[in-house]
Image: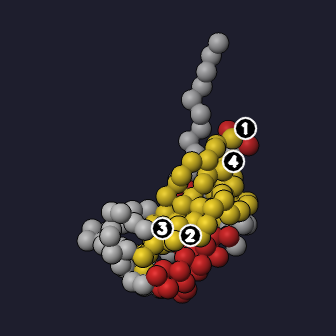
Amino acid sequence: MSSSAPSTFPDVEALVVDLLSDLPELAGAIVDDEPPAGFDGTQRAVIVSRRGGAWIDDLHLDQPLIELEVYGPTKSAAHILANQARAVVLNSAGTVLGTSVITDVSEADGPRWLPDYLYTAANRYLCVLRLSVRTD
């Protein structure tokens, strides 16, 4: 019995960061896959993390769960930013990013308010979105 290594799935964290970066509705917000140095949870920020999913090798299809951790200086500001970032991702089906195409997006969980125990002054909302990303 022979086995081959699975294909490398796309870096969907980087794809979603690219999708959200430089948008007028997110102007002034940090958009990255990790908090920057000096981050304390009170800045406007969208932190993108892969939280699972599955790669379907035969179809060259990745179906990741992407978590958006959204922070703001107030609970209201974090809520507004969470809805803006969430709307962009939910409306991204058909978007081509490099050699990848987002073919479908659905909401898996959220948005919801969740205290952050690492950044005690943080105002944070979380949501989880399921993407389907086809690669060449």
Q: What whole-number distance in Å separates the C-alpha atoms at marks 4 and 2?
A: 28 Å
At which x and y percent is residue 108?
A: 66, 59
What residue did someone put label 4 on? Answer: 61
Residue at 35% x, 78% y: name it: 42
Q: Which amino acid type corresponds to the residue marked 4 in the rendered image? A: Leu
Q: Are marks 4 and 3 in contact (CB under 8 Å)?
A: no
Q: Position of residue 72 (x, y in %)?
A: 43, 80
Per the image, the residue denoted by label 1 is 58
Disc 3 on helix, strand or loop?
Answer: loop
Res. 61 visible in picture: yes
Q: Amino acid at mark 3?
A: Leu
Distance Cα–Cα, label 1 vs label 4? 8 Å
Please name the residue shown 44% across and 62% down the image: 33
Q: Nearer the viewer, residue 122 or 100?
A: 122
**Residue nearest the observer in this picture, 59 or 127:** 127
Please state which amino acid type lies under the numbered disc 1.
Answer: Asp
Which residue is labeled 3 in the image? 114
Q: Earlier in the sequence, mark 4 or mark 3?
A: 4
Residue 107: name its quadrant.
bottom right
Circle 2 packing at 10 Å, graded few (<14), some (14-19), many (20+), is some
Residue type at numbered disc 2: Arg
Asked if 23 appears above or below 101 in the picture, the reply is: below
Q: Residue at x 46, y 82 (%)?
A: 75
Task: Mark 2 or mark 1: name the one nearer the start of the chain.
Answer: 1
Q: Is the residue 65 above or below the residue 17 in the image?
A: above
**What x and y, as percent, mark residue 60?**
69, 45
